[in-house]
Amino acid sequence: MIKINDSANIASYHSILQSLFSSALTGNTHMAADTGLQIAVIGLGSMGVGMARSLMRAGHVVRGYDVSETAIAALVNAGGIGSTKPAEAATSAAIVVVVVVNAAQTEAVLFGEGGVVPIMPAGGVIISCATMAPDAARAFAIRCAQRNVLYLDAPMSGGAARAGTGELTFMASGTPEAFIAARPALDAMAGKVYELGDEAGIGASFKIVNQLLAGVHIAAACEAITFAAKLGLDIAKVYEVITASAGNSWMFENRVPHILDGNYSPKSAVNIFTKDLGIVSDIGRAETFPLPIATSALQLFLMTAAAGMGRDDDASPARLIAEITGIELPARKDS
């Protein structure tokens, strides 16, 4: 496995990476600037495509893959290069950023048919961004290491808007070598990078705590705004008052406008939180740790998904509560 001493010059290492991977780009009209690298982004949803745009803005060449042809077309329209499978996107890439939904999809991208790890050279780095159980992240890191590929456990937070402006927060853990190799991409995509430990799984654990809070706060926001509607209040005015008061949360401030606008086109779907709070619940059970509030939020998301809204915006629990209680919310405008 490639090792880099603590005293190694990071800029020199990146220069070596550029030399290793630039030969395959000779003659490509999308050649990166002298300081740029070829970077693959696998998963071009609302987060992935924003991250790809940030990478291109920083001067990197981005090849991308997604199961959706529409998503690939959006990348191409933004100046990236589309691919028909993950391995094609990762060919000659110094860095592969994996922005899929869960551990199963991550495993398929890394090690499945047409996966990226078998074709990556020694010293290449995977930046794994999906929310997953810590054990899964550790297992992927071990399998990558067996092929001399670096693995950075790097789930992120911040939403699609910050993905597009390069201001995400990354909760990352991995070897020093993985951090060094991933730094050019992280610098382009992140407002903050928390280096949380030298082994995979730590970043995943931090993200799970974040998702516990995020899910609970969204559920509480949906409950609060529908409760206000039941009381006959002007919910737009409720939003104005609460966002200036102690009861506010980032999720209340971010998600309630979706309800006010009647726009449930998903930036983050209900099913994301059935998955993430499900992971929280599984870990709590394994650790014999009670999670009564998170479990209540999980049940609300599960009921919303069961009502046919699993792929809709994660503010949709408000719609479910409104249907159950007979209140009216602003008419849906995205359907």
Image: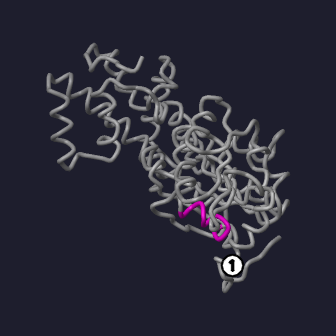
Q: How many marks?
A: 1
Q: Which residue lies most toward the bottom here? A: 7
Please give left or right for residue 289 compared with residue 84 in the image.
left
Residue 47 place in picture, x, y as percent: 52, 43
Q: Residue at x 45, y 23 (%)?
A: 304
Could you say whether the residue bearing mark 1 is in a helix, strand or loop?
helix
- Which of 71 and 282 lies nearest the eye of the viewer? 71
Tell me if residue 104 comes above or below residue 126 in the rendering: above
Rendered position, 123 above or below 331 = below
Q: Nearer the viewer, residue 185 or 319?
A: 185
* Residue found at the very far top of the displayed protein: 326
Instruction: Pick the quarter of the image with the N terminus.
Output: bottom right
Instruction: Depth check: give the residue in front, 98 or 269.
Output: 98
Where residue 242 sits, quadrant-wise, is top left
Please provide percent x and percent y for residue 81: 67, 43
Q: Residue at x 64, y 77 (%)?
A: 11
User: Which SS type dominates the magenta stretch?
Assistant: helix
Question: Is 10 left or right of 86, judged from the image as shown?
Answer: left
Q: Quarter holding the C terminus?
A: top left
User: Can you identify the residue that label 1 sits on?
Assistant: 12
User: What coloring was used for the rendering?
Assistant: one colour
Q: Is residue 182 magenta?
A: yes
**Whole-percent x, y for residue 131 in the image:** 58, 47
Q: Residue at x 57, y 53 (%)?
A: 56
- Amino acid at dot 1: Ser
In the rendered structure, does residue 22 fall within the stretch colored magenta? no
Q: Which residues are magenta?
A: 179-187
Label 1 Cα neighbours within 10 Å, binned few <14 / some 14-19 / many ≥20: few
Instruction: Give how far across and how far down residue 55 sits, in percent.
Output: 57, 55
Viewer-proximal residue, 52 or 186?
52
